[in-house]
Structures are given as structure tokens and as C-alpha cells.
Image: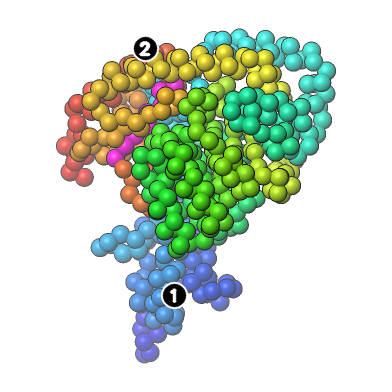
Amino acid sequence: MTVQQRAQSRCHWLPELERHSGPLYKALVDQLALDIADGNLKPGDRLPPQRLLADALQVTVGTITRAYREAERRGLLEAKIGSGTRVRAQQTEAPGFRHLSAAGQDSIDLSLSTPIETPLRQQQLSALMERLAGRPDVVEAALHYQPEQGNSAQRSSLARWLSAQGLPMAADELILTEGGQHADFLALQVLVRPGEAVASDALTYPGMIAAARQLGLKHLPVPMDGEGMRPDALERLCQQQRIRLLYLMPEHNNPTGAQMSQARREAIVEIARRYDLLLLEDGVQYVAPEHRGQAFYQLAPERALYIFSVSKILAGGLRFGALRAPASLITQLSAGLRAQCWASSSLPGAIACEWLASGMAETLIDWQWQELAARQQLMRECLQGYELHYHPCGLHAWMALPAPWRAGDFVQRAAERGVTLIGAEPFCVGSQPAPQAVRICLTPPPTRDQLRVALERLRELLHEGPPLKALLV
Ligand SMILES: Cc1ncc(COP(=O)(O)O)c(C=O)c1O
């Protein structure tokens, strides 16, 4: 028996590499993905040791190492010291990106980042819909196909409003989208090719993690400090990897609340210029102008895109947002949007733009800032002594759990007490370990009293500490 035959007889998985073209390591990963999809390999199945598989396939150990590493990056495998490399339980979306189904019927939801409910919003929307029904321009637009960039009157109206809010931009720099997530996805889909890399804060918005995964992009975490991503860490990453696009939330990182100083923004722009990175700033977690620094598109107009959405200030259900892009990218992005959905529907934009133009948006937003301040005060009282990070305009806070709490146990115990929240795991890019922290959204409870009940339940839990069982597992 040859070495190869002996190795083959001991390998319980032998990929058929001839079916694939391209480099061997990639062929191996592609076959692995097929075998997992076909059910030939199941979650938890152990893969052959690298040396054995190398002998069985007559390739170098380096090829197998590279393949296993690539498969790990794609989320197909996980390697654990002492138990080898195993097939990972598959997730088609970032865990925790299913907020809406997460909350139990009787529980108080602190998991969804949403505007605060007010009867004024409902009354205003009903009245506005009646008024819009009588407006021939709105009815006409609703019945007709719109240009790829979106309804031009709405683009002008939005550009005027954003400019007045300290975000100067022109109508022809905007592409209207069905919310911020759509704009995130569109930018990634059009500007980054499958297999290319994007980078972001190591803790970032799960919708971006889901979008990158869905599009088959490498998503690299940049280590953070209190201001978000660290320029030195970004520089090191750029030296090691070719990164196409950097995703940024400089005003208010979701989930940590971190805000970047001007010096930090300038340092990142300088790196972006040297390594030719596109910059995608997500401004969906909207903050008031007086709390805002310079947007990246103002610092680096040639390479920075900006995302706006009304979801956190008016209503998430409207699905109205926009992508601001440099002139050189508008045609490409418009073609991408056309390929997806032709153009965004004009009715949600008619509602949103009417609110923006009439001043109703300011009334709703100002009310929200006031209510939010009161809710943050309530949180400080209820969770006094615990490590809380939040922004004055932040709809959520980030709480570092005291040892020996683990985030997963805390989330589970909170759910048992009727409070739904999200731990750090869904925000983690790649396979880095998650910090022991949770995100607490202050806005979903309809009343402050309900928020108080939920926060008091969390305080009780924190005082009690984790049950012994959890410590022993
Ligand atoms: C940073 C960030 N971007 C985008 C979104 C999605 O926004 P939209 O609801 O407008 O799609 C969210 C929602 O939580 C978010 O936090």
C-alpha cells in the first residue's frame, strides 16, 4: 500500500477536486461548501487532520492549511484547540439580525433600535395621507416609474433638508433607497467584488455583517478604542490585506456608542488616500447637528459615500433613505439599483419629504431627543454603578457586564425575566471573541414606566449574579 492509499483509507472525507477549476485550495473549499450544502458533511463533523488529507490528495500541507483557513473565514468550518477542525453550524444571516421575531409576546423589548412611539406620529401620518391623496403630483408620481436615482423632487427636498442640518449635498449626488440597509447593501454589491475585502470597526452593525456575508465578501475587523477603529490597527491591516471599502459610523457606533474625534477622522482619511480605500459612512443612527463632527464625505469627497435614513428619527416602516456618492460613482450605483428594483417607490418618499419640508420632522425629532434624555436619566438611576456607554442622541446604551457574567447567560436570564436584549456576539466581525457586554435599546417600550420595569429587572439580575449552573458549564 502506498502512503497515498493508506492516507485515503483513513480519510472519512475526500474531496473531488477535479470538478473545480482554479487554485487547489479554492477547489477544496468549493467542494467542502458543496458537501455541506448536500448534507454529506453535517454540522459538528470533524475534518481529516491536515497532514493526512495532504497525503491522501498528494498536495502540500500548506495547501490544506490555506484551504481550512479560507473555509473558516467563509464560516464553513471552526477550529478549536484540542478538538480539531469541524463543520460549523450554518447561519444564513448574522445572528441577532432577526430582531422583530426575537421579542416574546409578553416580554418588554429592549432589543430593537427604533424611534420612540408617540400618538402625534400616528395622527400626523393619518392626516398627511389624506392630504397627499388630494395632491395630483404625488398621485401621478406614485403611478409612474421613477428614475433610477429616485424621484427628483424628493431628492431636491431631501438635499435641502440635509444641507440645513449641516450635511451639505446636492440633489444629483443622491440615490434614493428603501432605507439605510438597502443603501448599505447597494454600496457593497456595486463597489466590492465577491472575494474582495471590506473592513469595519470590530464591533459593528449586524446588517452590515449580514450584507457582506450574503455577498461573499471578506469582512475584516479593525480593533477599536473609545473612539472606534484605531488608525494604527487599520494601517497594519492595510499592509497585510487589500481592502476595497471601509465601513464607518463615526458619530455613533452601533453598538458601542463610540464617537470619533476630528483628529481620528483625519487620520483615517489619510490612510484611505494612501491605500485607495472607499469610505462608506453610515449615518442612519442619526445625531443632532450640534453633536456631530465633520462627515467623511466633507473630508474626502472623492472617495466617501454617506448613508441617511429616516428610520431612527421618523419611522422604520417608511423604508426611506438615501445614498450620497461622489459623481464618479453615481452612474454605476444607479445601474446597480436599477438591476435590483428599477427605482425606489415614491410613496414613502412623499410622506418623508413632506414631513421634512413642513417642519413636522423637527417637531418629532425634538420630542424624541427630550424623551430620550429622560429615558437615559432613568437608565442612569436604575443601573447606577454599572459601566454604561451611550451618546446623548443614542437610542441605545452599551453595558459592560460585571464579572463573572457572560453576555449569552445574561441575555438568556433576562429573557426568562421578560426582557429581550442583544448580547455582543451579533455585532462581532469575524471570529474574534465577543466582549461580555449587552446592548440596551431605550426606545421600544411605549412608556417610561415600562422601560423602568425592564431596567429594574435587569438590575435585579445584575445584583443576583449568574446562577451557579452557568458558571459550571
Ligand atoms: C447603523 C445602521 N445602519 C442601517 C440600519 C438600517 O436602517 P434602515 O431601517 O433604514 O434600513 C440600522 C438599523 O438599526 C443601523 O443601526
Residue 99 seen anywhere in this rendered image of the structure: yes
Counting from the top left corner in percent of width and height, residue 427 is at 42, 42
Q: Does label 2 or label 1 sit earlier along the sequence?
A: 1
Badge number at residue 63: 1
Type of the residue with mark 2: Asp
**Residue at 44% in and 75% down:** 63
The residue at label 2 has a CB less than 8 Å from ligand 1: no
Q: Secondary structure at mark 1?
A: helix
Residue annotated with mark 2: 449
- Magenta range: 436-443
Counting from the top left corner in percent of width and height, residue 342 is at 75, 40
Counting from the top left corner in percent of width and height, residue 429 is at 42, 48
Type of the residue with mark 1: Thr
**For residue 402, side relative to residue 270 (left or right):** left
- Quadrant showing the N terminus: bottom left
Badge number at residue 292: none
**For residue 331, side relative to residue 84 (left or right):** right
**For residue 462, side relative to residue 55 (left or right):** left
Query: Is the image coloured rainbow, by chain, by secondary structure, or in one colour?
Result: rainbow
Compare residues 349 and 60 and report the one nearer the observer. Answer: 349
Counting from the top left corner in percent of width and height, residue 41 is at 44, 62
